[in-house]
Amino acid sequence: MRLELIFFRLMLVVGVASAVGFGSVWAYQTKQANDWGNVLQDIRDSISLAPTDRFLCSGADVNTPRCERYLRLEARFDEANQIQADARLSARKYGLLAIAVPLLVALLFYSLRWSVTGKLRPLRPS
C-alpha cells in the first residue's frame, strides 16, 4: 500500500471527524443560545407586566417586596443575556472551525503531496 494513499485516508478521517465534532458542538451551542433567548423573552414579559415597578424602585424605598422582585428579575435578565451572548460567540467559533479545519487539512495534504511528488491532481486508483 502506498504511503500517499495512507495519508489521503488519514486526511479524510481527520477532516470528517473534525467536521462532525465541531459541527455537533456548533449545533449544541446554537440550541443553547436559542433556549436562553426563550428565557430572556419570558423575563422580558414578566418585566413588562409591571412597567411602574421600574419607576417605583428608582426612589428611596427599594426594600419593598415589589422592588425586590423587580430587581431580581433585572439581575436574572442581565445574567441570561450574558449567557446567551457567550453561547452565540461560542457557536460562531465552532461553526467556523467545522468549516475551516477540514479545508485546512485538505489544503495541507495536497500542498505536501505536490511538494513531495509534483502531482497536483486528486488521487486515482492505479
Image (tube, helix red, strand yellow):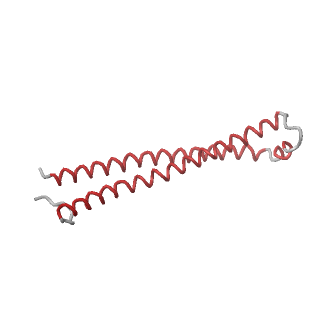
Q: Quadrant of residue 74?
A: top right
Residue 93 versus residue 36: which sits nearer the camera? Answer: 93
In x, y percent, where is residue 108?
29, 58
- Give the residue displayed 84% in from the left and 34% down from the top: 63
Residue most toward the front? 115
Please give the name of the residue rendered at 61% of the width and 45% of the height, measured from the top-left corner: 38
In which quarter of the view is residue 68 placed? top right
Judge left or right: residue 1 versus residue 16: left
Q: Does 117 appear above or below 98?
A: below
x and y, in percent, of residue 19 in the image: 36, 50
Q: Position of residue 15 (x, y in %)?
A: 31, 51
Q: Look at the image and tell me in which quarter the C terminus lies.
A: bottom left
State the count of labels. 0
Q: Is 67 displayed left or right of 39 in the figure? A: right
Q: Nearer the viewer, residue 88 or 4?
A: 4
Q: Residue furthest right?
A: 60
Q: Is residue 64 left or right of residue 83?
A: right
Residue 70 image point, x, y percent = 77, 40
